[in-house]
Image (cartoon, rainbow, N blue to C red):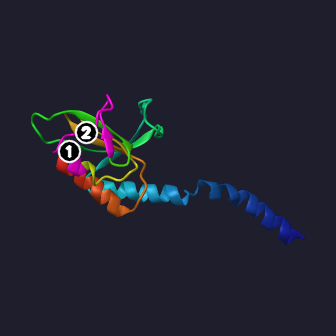
């Protein structure tokens, strides 16, 4: 009987340690973020106010992957993905830029937004997929930076 009491006390003491262990999806996201860092991308969680006209509201905060821009006089733009492959600007006009569209077509369906500012290019993503998806994202950010 004493053995069972000791075992149950040990189980009660150790059970909170199981809660501290990251879930499988959290571990996958952490591995993806470390791989992105090895590729030269920076990542941070950014709170966002998404446009009301998006069919599905993305999470806030959302994972932002970005890299610095190297162009001296960069153009600035922002595009949201309404449906897979359908990129629109803030006025819901479709993207018709022939320089950007080939790159946007390679992005996965769970990329919510891509924007280019004067100093960096950023992509907001749900972080789903395998490392090949991350390779495609890194290639798009590098090409557009």
Name the disc covering residue 80, or none. Answer: none
The reply to whether the magenta stretch includes residue 106 is no
Q: Residue at x 21, y 51 (%)?
A: 102
On screen, residue 43 versus residue 2, left or right, reads left
> Which element type, helix, strand or loop, lies under badge 2?
loop
Name the disc covering residue 95, or none. Answer: 2
Q: Residue at x 33, y 32 (%)?
A: 92
Q: Which residues are magenta?
A: 86-103
Instruction: Say which quadrant the C terminus sits in.
Output: top left
User: Residue 110: x percent and y percent?
Assistant: 40, 49
User: Around disc 1, counting alpha carbons within 10 Å, would you say few (fewer than 14), some (14 to 19), or many (20 or more)?
Assistant: few
Residue 24 versus residue 107 in the image, above or below:
below
Q: Residue at x 28, y 55 (%)?
A: 106
Give the farthest residue toward the left. 72
Residue 141 seen from this side: no
Single out the mark in the foreground, 1 or 2.
Answer: 2
Q: How many marks?
A: 2
Q: Is the magenta region chiefly helix, strand or loop? A: loop
User: Residue 12: x percent and y percent?
Assistant: 75, 58
Name the disc covering residue 100, or none. Answer: 1
Q: Residue at x 18, y 50 (%)?
A: 143
The reply to whether the magenta stretch includes residue 95 is yes
Which badge, 1 or 2, comes first in the chain's sequence?
2
User: Around disc 2, counting alpha carbons within 10 Å, would you say few (fewer than 14), some (14 to 19), or many (20 or more)?
Assistant: some
Residue 19 seen from this side: yes
Q: Quadrant of residue 122?
A: top left
Disc 1/disc 2 C-alpha distance (Å): 8 Å
Q: Are marks 1 and 2 in contact (CB under 8 Å)?
A: yes
User: Residue 105: x percent and y percent?
Assistant: 27, 52
Instruction: Say which quadrant the N terminus sits in.
Output: bottom right
Give the farthest residue toward the right. 1
> Which element type, helix, strand or loop, lies under badge 1?
loop
């Amino acid at each position: 009987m004493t053995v069972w009491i000791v075992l149950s006390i040990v189980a009660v003491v150790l059970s909170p340690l199981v809660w501290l262990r990251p879930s499988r999806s959290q571990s996958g996201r952490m591995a993806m973020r470390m791989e992105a860092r090895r590729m030269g991308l920076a990542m941070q969680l950014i709170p966002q106010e998404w446009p009301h006209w998006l069919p599905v509201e993305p999470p806030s905060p959302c994972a932002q992957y970005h890299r610095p821009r190297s162009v001296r006089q960069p153009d600035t733009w922002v595009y949201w993905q309404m449906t897979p492959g359908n990129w629109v600007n803030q006025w819901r006009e479709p993207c018709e830029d022939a320089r950007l569209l080939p790159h946007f077509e390679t992005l996965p369906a769970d990329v919510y937004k891509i924007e280019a500012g004067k100093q960096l290019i950023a992509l907001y993503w749900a972080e789903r997929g395998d490392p090949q998806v991350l390779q495609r994202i890194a290639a798009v950010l590098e090409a557009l930076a």
